[in-house]
């Protein structure tokens, strides 16, 4: 079965098949709105309940770090292939002759294609160790900025999770301090009922609607970003790119030994030949210069 999954960046690329700053602006607006709501609604209440200031300021620290890696993901050259570095990059990775055959040439750039490279139609350039084009940073993710993108995604997920935790602890602390969970209420039939979870959530939503809405939003965001982060870390740990993972099932399907093929054809199944152990794979991503220096020698 051919995989049809697409990352959020790939899905957005289909809608905007050209470079533009729309999603960068949208990203910053959403982030600003969330932090404004956090500052306006939660920070003051938590200070009244004597929350630790370091605990409350953690999301702002994560925001600063996140914006640094966001900027680096946006402006760093992902690994553009040029005439000047073409010969060097051809030697970096081994050709597997299934997904990346030798002596292939990019008809647009008129350059020989190194293994693991791909021409990005959005940026109109060939990128070494191409992962995907991310509209949120308006840049390709490749050999030289994958590390920044992973750290950007990690800090973004952590900041959303931290806000969710702070909001949840605030609401729980509020209920405990007020002893509201010990109260009773009269239902529609006139019977006294002990406050249950559903009634408690309804009460909190009516009393603090913006905080409960913010909590729900950052919780959903945490799960979505967390899922994508786990996928990205899996690819990093196994030394795969999103492009290779997506095309892997197609390559397997086309060369599947159980499919009808000419008698003379030898079945070729795609295998990941670039994984050399967890630490070696991570070192290649986070210290790409050292990896390239070893290839020069």
Image (cartoon, rainbow, N blue to C red):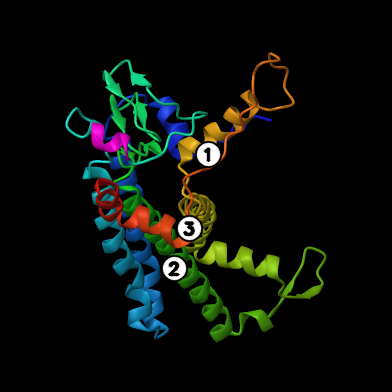
Magenta segment boundaries in residue numbering: 87-91
**Element marked by disc 2:** helix
Question: How would you classify the magenta stretch by its main secondary structure?
Answer: helix
Between label 3 and label 1, give the one nearer the viewer.
1
- Category of crowding for the residue at label 2, using alpha-carbon neighbours closer than 10 angstroms: few (below 14), some (14–19), many (at least 20): many
For the residue pair 116 and 189, the one nearer the viewer reads as 116
Q: Is residue 261 magenta?
A: no
3D distance between C-alphas at marks 3 and 2 = 9 Å
**Element marked by disc 1:** helix
**Element marked by disc 3:** helix
Q: Residue at x 24, y 51 (%)?
A: 293
Residue 172, position as x, y percentages in the image: 56, 77
Q: Residue at x 58, y 83 (%)?
A: 176
Earlier-in-chain disc, 1 versus 2: 2
Residue ID for mark 2: 162
Earlier-in-chain disc, 3 versus 2: 2
Res. 152 in view = no
3D distance between C-alphas at marks 1 and 2 = 31 Å
For the residue pair 52 and 135, the one nearer the viewer reads as 135
Query: Where residue 245 is drawn, which disc sits there?
Result: 1
Residue ID for mark 3: 218
């Amino acid at each position: 079965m051919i995989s049809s999954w697409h990352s959020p960046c790939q899905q957005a690329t289909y809608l905007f098949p050209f470079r533009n700053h729309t999603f960068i602006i949208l990203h910053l607006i959403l982030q600003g709105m969330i932090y404004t709501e956090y500052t306006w609604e939660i920070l003051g209440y938590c200070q009244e309940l004597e929350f630790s200031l370091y605990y409350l300021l953690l999301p702002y620290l994560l925001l600063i770090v996140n914006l640094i890696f966001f900027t680096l993901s946006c402006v760093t050259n992902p690994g553009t292939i040029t005439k000047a570095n073409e010969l060097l990059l051809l030697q970096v990775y081994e050709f597997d002759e299934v997904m990346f055959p030798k002596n292939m040439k990019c008809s647009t750039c008129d350059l020989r294609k190194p293994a693991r490279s791909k021409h990005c139609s959005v940026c109109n350039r060939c990128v070494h160790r191409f992962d995907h084009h991310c509209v949120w940073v308006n840049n390709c993710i490749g050999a030289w900025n994958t590390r920044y993108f992973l750290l950007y995604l990690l800090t973004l997920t952590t900041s959303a999770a931290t806000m969710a935790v702070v909001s949840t602890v605030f609401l729980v602390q509020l209920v405990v301090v007020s002893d509201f969970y010990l109260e009773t209420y009269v239902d529609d039939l006139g019977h006294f009922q002990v406050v249950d979870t559903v009634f408690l959530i309804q009460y909190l939503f009516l009393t603090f609607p913006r905080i409960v809405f913010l909590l729900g939003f950052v919780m959903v965001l945490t799960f979505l970003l967390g899922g994508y982060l786990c996928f990205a870390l899996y690819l990093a740990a196994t030394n795969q790119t999103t492009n290779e993972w997506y095309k892997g099932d197609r390559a397997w399907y086309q060369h599947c030994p159980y499919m009808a093929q000419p008698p003379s054809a030898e079945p070729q199944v795609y295998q990941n030949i670039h994984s050399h152990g967890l630490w070696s794979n991570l070192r290649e991503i986070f210290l790409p210069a050292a990896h390239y220096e070893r290839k020069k020698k």
